[in-house]
Amino acid sequence: MIRLLSEQDYSTWIELAKEVEPLFGPMSDSREFQEGIKNCIQKNNAFGINDQNGNITGIIALDRDNNEIVWLAVGKKYRGNKYGDKLVKKAIEELKRNGDIYVQTFSKKIEEGKSARSIYEKNGFIDFKDAGKNPADIETVIMVKK
């Protein structure tokens, strides 16, 4: 089940951020990141997907002003269950009426990013432009869905 995140989900989001920091860079201790996720929650721009026991397995965050997916992560123990794909479909549903949708993700060269790229590609995103290295020093690109 996909649902809007609430303030009660803040600590779960921080824990998920800690798990993916090796690929994204430092987040959980960053005041800017903490304020950003609080803002996403308050503006109804963050969605979580629950497993059958009600645990949040993944989170996606949107920037509606820029028509962009700004954050996507699925917990390691939940990967391979199509949770990421379902969250991306939800984001597309939320953003599609505003035109092209953008996301920054891993470049084709990054082995650890292949599953994320495949989710975006399967949902119609294509590479748009190079985006340099992220805070974890990993090469990224901007993808677009027309």
Image: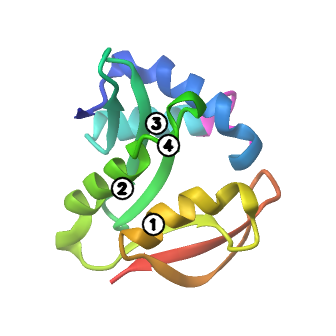
Counting from the top left corner in percent of width and height, residue 74 is at 51, 39
Could you tell me which secondary element the residue under label 2 belongs to? Answer: helix
The quadrant of the picture occupied by the N terminus is top left
From the viewer's side, name the closer residue of 93 and 11.
93
Counting from the top left corner in percent of width and height, residue 90 is at 26, 52
What type is the residue that disc 3 sits on? Ile
What type is the residue that disc 2 sits on? Val
From the viewer's side, name the closer residue of 63 and 93.
93
Circles 4 and 1: CB atoms closer than 8 Å = no
Quarter of the figure with residue 29: top right
Instruction: Decide which of tag 1 and tag 3 comes sooner along the chain.
Output: 3
Q: CA distance from mark 4 to mark 1?
A: 15 Å
Indicate left or right for 137 with 80 as reference: right
Q: CA distance from mark 4 to mark 2?
A: 14 Å
Could you tell me which secondary element the residue under label 1 belongs to? Answer: helix
Q: Residues within 10 Å of mark 2 (few under 14, many from 20)?
A: many
Instruction: Decide which of tag 3 and tag 4 comes sooner along the chain.
Output: 3
Q: Residues within 10 Å of mark 4 (few under 14, many from 20)?
A: few
Secondary structure character of the magenta stretch overall:
loop
Counting from the top left corner in percent of width and height, residue 88 is at 36, 56
Q: CA distance from mark 1 to mark 2?
A: 7 Å
Q: Which residue is mark 3?
A: 37
